[in-house]
Image (cartoon, coloured by chain):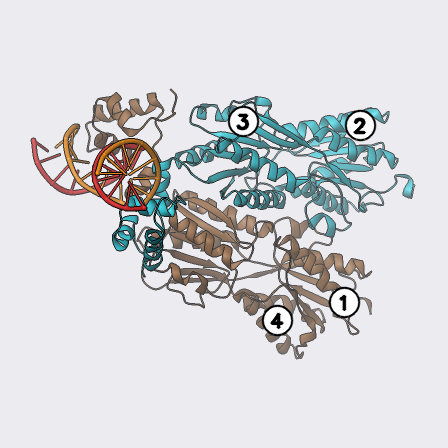
Chain colours: A cyan, B brown, C orange, D red
Amino acid sequence: MDAAKVSLRDVARHAGVSPSTVSNVLNGRAGRTRPDTTERVRRAVRELGYAPNQLARQLRTGQVRTIGLIVPSVANPFWGFVALRVEQAAREHGYQVLLCNAERDTEREVRFAETLLDSGVRGLIFGSSPLSFDHLGHLDGRGLQVVAFDRSPAGVSPLVVGSVEIDNVLAARLAISHLTGLGHRRIGFLSGPIRTVSRRERLAGYRHALADAGITPDDDLVWEGSSVSTFGDAESAELGRTGAHQLLSMPARPTALFTINDMYALGAYAGARDLGIRVPDDLSVVGFDDLPVLAEVATPPLTTVRQPLPQMMRTATAQLIGRLEGERSGPPDHTTATPELVVRQSTARRDHHE
Amino acid sequence: MDAAKVSLRDVARHAGVSPSTVSNVLNGRAGRTRPDTTERVRRAVRELGYAPNQLARQLRTGQVRTIGLIVPSVANPFWGFVALRVEQAAREHGYQVLLCNAERDTEREVRFAETLLDSGVRGLIFGSSPLSFDHLGHLDGRGLQVVAFDRSPAGVSPLVVGSVEIDNVLAARLAISHLTGLGHRRIGFLSGPIRTVSRRERLAGYRHALADAGITPDDDLVWEGSSVSTFGDAESAELGRTGAHQLLSMPARPTALFTINDMYALGAYAGARDLGIRVPDDLSVVGFDDLPVLAEVATPPLTTVRQPLPQMMRTATAQLIGRLEGERSGPPDHTTATPELVVRQSTARRDHHE
DNA sequence: GTGAAAGCGCTAACAT
DNA sequence: ATGTTAGCGCTTTCAC
């Protein structure tokens, strides 16, 4: 009854068969054994409460049904949702997910990758972070396969077997043309360090869209906060607030703000409030991500750009597992999803109040 | 250079020594080897880019420097912060953390526990969830050790070697007496399913504090939402909104709301707004958790009860690892931390506007 | 101070 | 249809 240390051998003895038979029965290769033997083994397993030692199994087979998910910050609910989706998809393939919180720190990314590799994990999904995968270059040749999410495969590391992202340029255009359509001409761009591909692209999209509307981009309106804290994206909101303070204290202050994610937008709300500036009456705000519920319950409900997360994560996971199981090979798979603007109540016509 | 499949034997050969010597050098048992041998081995390791196979090591030693953290919902940033802290503390002891998202589902908890056990993990930290640990009873005897956070060890399972929680009764009293002190007499209690010890205790504290203020608790003011969605705590905010709708539509509606966590509070904000009820002018709201930044940037900034998370998680982690390493034994360790009320701007005097 | 040998629990050829 | 055997990569007595 006590499952303390029953090994496969114990089961074999108890059932009066050899270890290999037990192994065969347990690994679906029934049919290879006579029904009654199979039954005897099954019963022994049950009676002894046998649970296979995965360590031994994995050591022997070299197969580990686990993938790693490396995210920039578990404190940002966005990544919580990403994790949720990946885990869900992985489970459908019989895989487990190891969630690693890298805090946007390259060194930590490397350590995670190494540790996982050492314990047999061969597949990793990376959430957006540094520009390239150069820091993982030395891991090449160890069988590692990487799928990038929201992080272009630009570095073209041989490790990268796939990528999933949205069209960030388009996403930014969506946001900006919504704003210009409402008559805004001085639109701020609020972001943390622009060191990821996705952030670069969003900035590019912002500039293009402005130009398209006949507005000359003004770099003074681009605020790039630099993080100091080691505590990740709680900080996002904080940065959004600080950025808003600065941008809104300019002589010719912006009438609208486009933020790099919803946490920044929420922070910007607070920043505006601090200065007695009302959203959306005096200031329009567009966020990014459409954080489930949070964006909706915010005061006022946040207009934001949504990424189709569920499909994206499903795709990323399937790509990775496909590679791991050798069903897929050849050049990397790249998927680009289409963003969508969700208009709520944080944006209003500029002339509204003038 | 290629770290593909260098094993300890390869290193030994390369250095002209035996495997055991390499093992000794690598496991700190230097001093047992002559300095020059040690050096030779070290060089070989470097030259070959050797990385020990943890699977093999763990199989042999039975030691796995990994603990599991089971949380009810990674989509609630609160648990993200918990994870952050646990991981931080664990790292200081040289341990890794496996983050498991149980979605408040007992079956998933069991599966996680079993899977981890099968891969050698012996220590688990459980975030609040069901009332007891009965569902894990069958795992007894497999060497599992559990520390409960925000989840009383009431079930007194032999698995539980420690627990860390705040004084939830006191926490609720803090919130309620703040409110009664402001003149509120009809105070709603907004929660999801009251199936955890901590939620029960908060409800008890709410009732006591009311009684202390000479108010007869009215059960119509206790709203216990039932979750349906499988998507965890994004739902919290949703439930908060729904609950607020109901409570605020009563003939004699409450003038204040105490919510089971900050996500509910944010949801309640939205619910009130939907009905044209202003916070804090027409309705005071007190949350729970003090979600970093989110509570602060909310509109209005949220008055809430704070748990001293960093210390609590540090304690929980240390307790668990202490047990795993056999430094600690005997009866379970219980720690109760003291909550603190953070007053911001979501609460106001009741007579304010009457 | 160093090496030889056994074995952790499992699987997979290869017999029988 | 089942059993025998070898070995995944490591650690650890126990000899030398």
Q: Quadrant of residue B183?
A: bottom right
Q: Nearer the viewer, mark 4 or mark 1?
A: 1
Q: Secondary structure at mark 2?
A: helix
Task: Report in which chain the residue with disc 3 lies.
Answer: A
Query: Where does the image place residue B322, in percent across and percent down from the top left?
Result: 35, 52
Disc number at residue B206? 4
Q: Is residue A341 above or below residue A154?
A: below
Query: Where does the image place residue B58, in percent across and percent down from the top left?
Result: 32, 42
Q: Is residue A280 above or below residue B312?
A: above
Query: Where does the image place residue B86, in percent across and percent down from the top left?
Result: 47, 48
Q: Which residue bears the numbered disc 2?
A: A209
Q: Quadrant of residue B159?
A: bottom left
Task: Report in which chain the residue with disc 4 lies.
Answer: B
Q: Which residue bears the numbered disc 1?
A: B248
* Residue A78 left/right relative to B43: right
Identified by mark 1, the residue type is Leu
Q: Secondary structure at mark 3?
A: strand
Q: Is residue A194 above or below residue A277?
A: above
Q: Which residue bears the numbered disc 3?
A: A160
**Which residue corresponds to the image point at 43% horizontal and 24% vertical from the top-left?**
A141
Of B35 and A19, nearer the camera is A19
Identified by mark 2, the residue type is Ala
Residue at mark 3 to residue at mark 4: CA–CA distance: 54 Å
Say yes or no: labels 3 and 1 on the same chain. Answer: no
Identified by mark 3, the residue type is Val
